[in-house]
Amino acid sequence: MDALFTVPTPQNEPVKGYAPGTPERASLQAKLTELQAKEHDLDMYISGEWRRGNGEAIKVVQPHKHSHVLGVTHAATGAQAAEAVAAAKAAKREWASMDFADRAAIFLRAAELIAGPYRDTLNGATMLGQSKTAAQTEIDAACELIDFLRFNVHFAEQIYAKQAQSSAGLWNRTDHRPLDGFVYAITPFNFTAIAGNLPTAPALMGNTVVWKPATTQQFAANFLVQILEEAGLPGGVINMVTGPGPEISDVVMADPDLAGIHFTGSTRVFQSLWKHVGENISSYRSYPRLVGETGGKDFIIAHPSANIDQLAVAMTRGAFEYQGQKCSAVSRTYMPRSLWEGGLKDQVLDITSQIKYGDVTDFDHFGGAVIDERAYAKHTALFKRVADDKEATVIAGGTADDSVGYFVQPTIIEATNPEHEVFTDEYFGPITSVYVFDDSDFDSVVRQAADVAPYALTGGIFANDRAAIARASEELRFAAGNYYINDKPTGAVVGQQPFGGSRGSGTNDKAGSWQNLVRWISPRSIKENFVPPVDWKYPHMGA
Ligand SMILES: NC(=O)c1ccc[n+]([C@@H]2O[C@H](COP(=O)([O-])OP(=O)(O)OC[C@H]3O[C@@H](n4cnc5c(N)ncnc54)[C@H](O)[C@@H]3O)[C@@H](O)[C@H]2O)c1
Ligand SMILES: N[C@@H](CCC=O)C(=O)O
């Protein structure tokens, strides 16, 4: 077709509330019952075909009720990972040459399928498999994913429209080619939206992908593939392989056509992937793009002028929503003594005592369980460590019970040493820390907090004093890629607060923005000369 199409202007998907008596609540509850009624096959998807892995069988359970098996997935063997790579390479030429309008239409259609007929399915699967409440799954598996799909199409259009200038007699063009090879997408357990975004963003830009989700997110991941299939995604464009990772990576990352890695997960794993690429660097046809969003030790720092009611809600919600398993979760706080001892501590402890974690299919619960046995063991090991620690006092929680689900109680640890591990290490659970300081020390506390942790993902300042906000914002300029003033540092919205951090927190390529999409293209500059010269001499040489 001969036209320069414009894509629909994206709007953020409205968030449903699931309040008692609403039709959306009844509909989601019915879907939860349906999804739990049988064990599901959680297979791989290669070349547009569902295939069973030939490796070990892994049970995917409900973290808040680990006796309930949602389905069984089988790890891909090295040979099957090689088949996924071959499928991505085989699909590349046709996909890369498809019109942008046709590629875009597939992802826009997927967004509509999630907003409509598949909303309950993806929300329900995320609730059961990842132990999210209705509120937390709605902002993730529905709204954020829909936003990623719609906004990425809009950002891609803007990128493609960027063209070089032309002088007289010339026509300069920029061909925003996909990368020369395939992309390896590796996704974490905690966000279905991230699992959806990491393979689809490079695919939208004309790349083909091998995608490895976390096994603990495999339940929702399988529905994601079904949605993309129904939206018309051709076989081979996104190939999903199942299993823990290292064996798959050994094969995928040894391939000379590896052109990029799109990763979200822990800092440790991303650093190991970077090292792996470094070791193989001379064997690749091009330099693989490495995009990774990783861990955080996200903070709230309060000034004595801050509002106590706002602080108490920001701290508890920021720390304990989704059991603290957001990379953005508030995991360290710095509170002025006048506020902390003047009512803030009592308010925080009161809210924390009311937070109930349990089975997420009971909509009265604020949260569910932590993801698995490994996370549970990590948190309980911390509780043992701090029990005899003179510098740290557990003032809320500090208990756990895994008899039914992997439940860890919302925990607050007050510590007197600002370099204590509770201010530097990521736990990725419902655990936060407090450092109480004399009001006059605000500036030095901000300075210390800016650099004490190896991360720089999210953080927030609470103050009414504008000069204090200005000073702290300058001091914290490189301490967080997403920085909040008088708000909790979680819940970034696509198109409004592009998300990502630097230092140990990642490459800061801002998921859901044009900055991320440009990592998946390799532009070709084309110069066409309408009047090529016919005289070989320079003007200064005379006739
Ligand atoms: N910055 C962000 O935007 C962001 C968002 C979500 C989560 N996170 C981070 O993710 C972490 C929690 O998620 P997680 O527990 O799933 O992280 P993880 O690093 O344990 O796992 C992430 C993914 O990597 C895979 N993996 C592990 N080793 C691998 C290897 N050698 N090759 C290939 N894949 C491999 C896992 O199977 C999983 O799919 C936290 O550190 C959190 O801060 C960051
Ligand atoms: N983008 C999400 C966090 C994603 C990581 O887990 C937020 O802003 O809370």
Image (cartoon, helix red, strand yellow):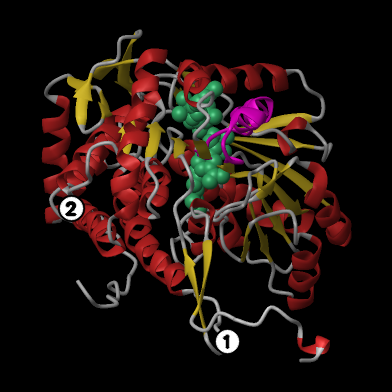
Q: Residues within 10 Å of mark 1 (few under 14, many from 20)?
A: few
The percent position of residue 146, horizontal first and vertical second, equals 30, 56
Report the span colored magenta: 261-288
Q: Is residue 527 magenta?
A: no
Which mark, residue 288?
none
In the rendered image, which quarter contains the N terminus? Answer: bottom left
| Residue carrying label 2 | 113
Q: Tell me if 343 is positioned left or right of 248 in this view.
A: right
Which mark, residue 167?
1
The mark nearer the N terminus, 2 or 1, is: 2
Respond yes or no on whether mark 1 lies under 8 Å from ligand 1.
Answer: no
- The residue furthest front is 543
The percent position of residue 513, horizontal first and vertical second, equals 48, 61
Give me the residue at 44% from left, 19% from top: 244
In the displayed structure, would residue 404 be above or below residue 464?
A: above
Nearest the camera: 207 or 286?
A: 286
In what element is the residue under mark 2?
A: helix
Residue 352 in sight in this render: no
Instruction: Place residue 433 in its image quadrant.
Output: top right
Instruction: Place residue 356 in its image quadrant.
Output: top left
Q: Are marks 2 and 1 in contact (CB under 8 Å)?
A: no
Give me the residue at 39% from left, 21% from top: 82
Q: Is residue 271 magenta?
A: yes
Give me the residue at 32% from left, 28% from top: 218
In what element is the residue under mark 1?
A: loop
Residue 339 in sight in this render: yes
Q: Tell me if 203 is positioned left or right of 506 in this view.
A: left
Tag 1: amino acid: Ser
Give me the residue at 54% from left, 83% from top: 166
Tag 2: amino acid: Leu
In the rendered image, which quarter contains the C terminus? Answer: bottom right
